[in-house]
Amino acid sequence: MATNSVEAEIGIIGGSGLYDFPGLGNVSEFRLSTPFGNPSDAVVVGDLDGRRVAFLARHGRHHQHSPAAIPAAANIYAMKYLGVRELVSVSAVGSMRDHLRPGELVVPDQLVDFTKGRTSTFFDRGLVAHLPFAEPFCPRLRRQVLTAVSTVPGVASHGSGTYLCIEGPQFSTRAESDLNRALGMDIVGMTAAPEAKLAREAGLCLATIALVTDYDCWRQDEAPVTATMVAEVMRRNVAAAQQAIRNLTAAPREERTCDCQDALSQAIMSNAASMSDCDRDRLDLLAGPYLP
Ligand SMILES: [Zn+2]
């Protein structure tokens, strides 16, 4: 699968509670098989406000993949294959700060990866690459997403924050939650880190819309959370994220003036001339323009 068959412009990876995207027109479904395995589910490609959009449910449409079992490399590869250049990742998170309240949206600007042993690179064999990752999210797309998020009526949003990605699937202990706050984390989730690293390697712009569902477990005076309360917050969060994405797709197209698409250009350490044909085929879609 080395050539694009579909031109989607914008990719959306939906997290907990966001398993489809109502309003897409002229829809096609793609069940892809990639050199990095099968994506979480079929990718749904459709029109939204005149833009071609590819939607994928990160956990699968039936929420069948736990965070550590999400085939993040296959998901990002599939988006690249379908022509996506800008990727918006939607993710439910816990809040580590009083001012980031349940029901609010955060567009994080930093990321800390506490996951263990997940696949977070395409270049583990055959070709080695060390990409810059000081800014884990595309600053240009972040600005656009923040504008889109901040114009959702009646929903407070925050334009910065450090997203801590933990391994899960259990939530943190209270000691971990206190420690993570002391370390400067603002929100905690289980999925953003491998996705952001893989998107950068694939040359995609990526921004995350984090949906705050609860206060993790550090606030001991917090009233006990019920499933009904969480479900209601989740419903409002998902509606807000969908509206934000519609604001984004309705906004004027912006030129990609950021460095994301050529992130790999100065990063390859290997002597690519000695790659096997097999590795070259496997990595052609991602690294082809930078190989001799
Ligand atoms: Zn970018």
Image (tube, rainbow, N blue to C red):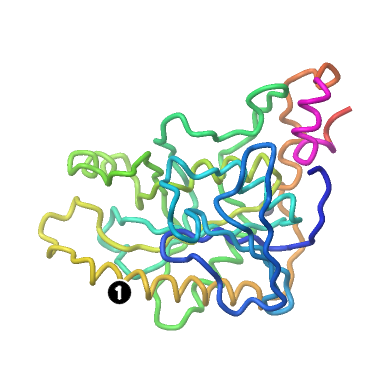
Residue 63 occupies quadrant: bottom left
Q: Is residue 52 left or right of residue 199?
A: right
With respect to residue 112, does 104 lie above or below? below
- Quarter occupied by the C terminus: top right
Q: Is residue 21 left or right of residue 128?
A: left
Q: Residue at x 23, y 71 (%)?
A: 228
> What's under tag 1, amino acid-wise?
Glu
Q: Residue 93, position in %: x, y?
A: 37, 56
Q: Residue 246, position in %: x, y?
A: 59, 76
Instruction: Give the structural element (helix, strand or loop) at label 1.
Output: helix
Q: Is residue 131 left or right of residue 164?
A: right
Decide which of 248, 48 is in the foreground and name it.
Answer: 48
Give the residue furthest to the bottom: 153
With respect to residue 258, does 287 lie above or below? above
Q: Residue at x 69, y 42 (%)?
A: 34
Does the magenta run of residues contain 187? no
Residue 55 occupies quadrant: bottom right
Q: Residue at x 61, y 52 (%)?
A: 138
Q: Residue at x 76, y 26 (%)?
A: 279
With respect to residue 198, does 212 lie above or below? below
- Circle 1 residue: 232
Is the CB of mark 1 within 8 Å of ligand 1?
no
Decide which of 271, 109 is in the foreground and name it.
Answer: 271
Does the magenta run of residues contain 281? yes
Q: Residue 202, position in %: x, y?
A: 69, 43
Q: Which residues are magenta?
A: 276-289
